[in-house]
Image (cartoon, rainbow, N blue to C red):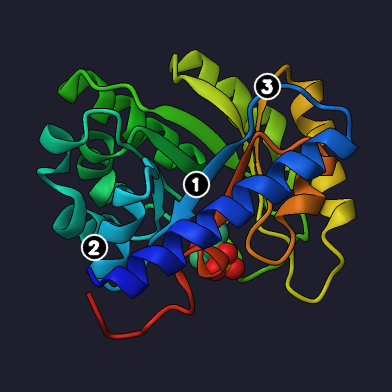
Amino acid sequence: MTVTDFKKIAQRRQDILASMKRAQALSGRTEAVTLVAVSKVQPYARIESALAAGQRVFGENRVQDAQARWTGHRQVYPDLHLHLVGPLQTNKTEDAVLLFDTIETLDRPKLAQAIAKAMAKTGRRPDIFIQVNTGEEPQKAGVLPDGLPDLIALAKELNLPVRGLMCIPPVEDPAGPHFALLARLAKGHDLVNLSMGMSGDYETAIRFGATHVRVGSAFFGERVVGQV
Ligand SMILES: *Cc1c(COP(=O)(O)O)cnc(C)c1O
């Protein structure tokens, strides 16, 4: 960690928190909005800087990368809170349940079963968000809006701690209508939390009711592919 790195990241963090507050004030919301700093593929020095600046909530998109990076940190940072924001394969479920505090990407019945099993085995119960494919994109993860009621019913049957919904709008669409749809779906199912909004649109997401924004490059700087 260099002093310049630290100053840059501490400043960006302050700026993002300030614009989150502004967006919140504009929409007349008072409840807390959590900044999830998405640290996937960022050089470790930047994560050290973020920790030094006081950031404690981080998002990762791959279980193995996150294990390599975060194992052992809880002794030093007991208030660390890790979110899985990338797709989860059933064979990685137990590792994910052991490492993460929130899993944002439940999107299919088989995964719900695997998570329930891993929770029973490990005794850990991370919060679960269901990822919704609001743009109905064939290549994208997430349950289709039509499939959401059945998946929620199954999750309830399995006694999963489902706390909210998450979406990643199609890059080519304005995000607003997707955020509005996710908010409507959550309300219809009495789910309080909404994980939506990234570097380019987190202020918009807050105006539509986001409780969690997932900000990567605007927080850490551009991702450096190939570095750990
Ligand atoms: C990478 C990623 C982000 C952060 O993206 P930025 O545009 O860099 O803010 C947010 N959410 C998910 C699911 C991601 O994979």
140 and 213: which is toward the camera: 213
Asked whether residue 182 appears in the rendered view, the answer is no
Residue density around tag 1, few if under 14, some if 14–19, many if 20 or more, within 10 Å: many
Task: Give the CA separation, mark 2 to mark 1.
Answer: 17 Å
Label 2 beta carbon less than 8 Å to ligand 1: no
Query: Callout 2, which amino acid?
Result: Asp
Q: Which residue is mark 3?
A: 191
| Nearer the camera: disc 2 or disc 1 | 1
| Residue 162 position in % (x across, y down) | 53, 24
Mark 2: secondary structure: helix
Q: Which mark is residue 36?
A: 1
Give whichever of discs 3 and 2 has the lower sequence position. 2
Q: Is residue 5 above or below residue 55?
A: below
The residue shown at (24%, 67%) is: 44
Distance of label 3 from label 2 (alpha carbons): 30 Å
User: Secondary structure beneath disc 1?
Assistant: strand
Cα distance between the residues tagged 3 and 1: 19 Å
Using residue 76 as the reference point, say whether residue 132 is left or right of it: right
Residue 5, given in percent of the width and then of the height, sits at: 35, 71
Tell me if label 2 and label 1 are in contact, CB under 8 Å.
Answer: no
Residue sitting at 76 percent across and 52 percent down?
Answer: 203
Which quadrant contains ligand 1?
Answer: bottom right
Query: Which image quadrant for residue 195?
Result: top right
Q: Disc 3 residue type? A: Leu
Q: Amino acid at mark 1?
A: Val
Quadrant in which the C terminus appears: bottom left
Tell which tag, 3 or 1, sits nearer the viewer. 1
Nearest the camera: 77 or 65?
77
Q: Position of residue 35 (x, y in %)?
A: 54, 44
Is residue 95 in view from this perspective? Answer: yes
Q: Vertically, is 125 above or below 175?
A: above
